[in-house]
Amino acid sequence: MGVAAKKIGTYQNGITRVEFEKSWVDLIDRVQIIDDKVSKKADEVVLTMVLAHRREIEQLQLEFLQLQKEIKTLQKQQKTLVEEKQKHINEKQPTKNKWWNWFQK
């Protein structure tokens, strides 16, 4: 019984089993606290990145809409210029008289 008591009561370096278990629980608690802090920090970093990406997406959407408007404006201007050029070309062409149309038939 003396040997069993020695094994239960103390270890070679003089720490009791109760002290060891208390130290172990304290260590586990500290590791858990550190894990929680790291997890919280990672969540904050991810949230910051998500918000930054969201702002960037919104900015790109605004730029896209502006570019669409500019393209539509340019297309209208181009269409107007082509119509004016065609009208100008048609005005320069001499009108054919009725005799010309009769001989072309």
Image (spheres, rainbow, N blue to C red):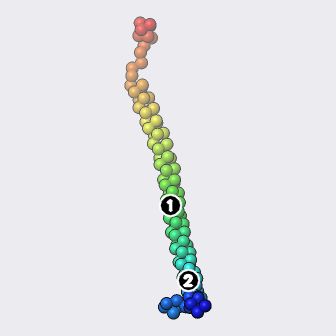
Kindly state the secondary structure of the residue where label 1 is placed: helix
Q: Residue at x 55, y 72 (%)?
A: 40
The disc label shown at residue 63, or none: none
Q: Position of residue 103 (x, y in %)?
A: 41, 6
The kind of residue on which mark 1 rests is His
Who is closer to the viewer here, 99 or 1?
Answer: 1
**Quarter of the image where one finds residue 39:** bottom right
The kind of residue on which mark 2 rests is Trp
Image quarter where the N terminus lies is bottom right
Who is closer to the viewer here, 33 or 29?
Answer: 29
Q: Residue at x 45, y 42 (%)?
A: 74
Who is closer to the viewer here, 11 or 101?
Answer: 11
How crowded pointer 1 is (Cα within 10 Å; few <14, some 14-19, many 20+) is rated as few
The disc label shown at residue 53, or none: 1
Kindly state the secondary structure of the residue where label 2 is placed: helix
Residue holding disc 2: 24
- Compared with 49, 77 (above or below) is above
